[in-house]
Amino acid sequence: QVQLVESGGGLVQPGGSLRLSCAASGFAFSRRPMYWYHQAPGKERDLVASITANGGSTNYADSVKGRFTIARDNAKNTVALQMNNLNPEDTAVYYCNAKETTPWGTTDYWGQGTQVTVSS
């Protein structure tokens, strides 16, 4: 079955950096776009970044453009999110996501999430 396991979260001061990683298994990783979402307390889960299956194209939420970078290693079935110049508004649980689309709809697969806290 699909498994997504995030790691790399933690507590960091404003202006600091963190690198999140997601290890994927149970599906054809190299054929699927991958996504990072975040969810702050009391808020909806929002898309942060996405990357195409071959890694050739990426997209970012406006709030993280120029600070976050998504990258993948299809040989290792991993996707990473490099987060620089973090600010308190980035505090959230970060989730790795894969999607399976069929004629009957789209299924979202999620990891367990990793907490990122930006605070002095």
Image: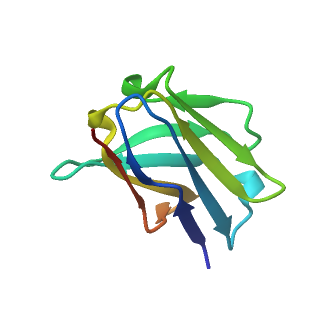
- Residue 73 picture location, percent across and down: 77, 49
Residue 44 placement, left or right of 5: left
Residue 88 placement, left or right of 1: left
Residue 55 placement, left or right of 51: right
Residue under the point 42% across and 47% down:
37
Q: Name above or below for residue 67 compared with residue 110.
A: above
- Residue 7 picture location, percent across and down: 54, 61
Locate the N terminus by quadrant: bottom right
Q: Nearer the viewer, residue 85 or 28?
A: 85
- Residue 90 picture location, percent across and down: 33, 38
Residue under the point 46% across and 54% down:
9
Locate the C terminus by quadrant: top left
Residue furthest right in the image: 75
Q: Nearer the viewer, residue 15 or 81?
A: 15
Residue 67 placement, left or right of 58: left
Answer with the quarter of the image where residue 24 lies. bottom right
Q: Name above or below for residue 6 compared with residue 43.
A: below
Answer with the quarter of the image where residue 12 lies. top left
- Residue 59 picture location, percent across and down: 54, 29
Residue furthest front in the image: 120
Residue under the point 28% across and 41% down:
119
Residue under the point 69% across and 68% down:
27
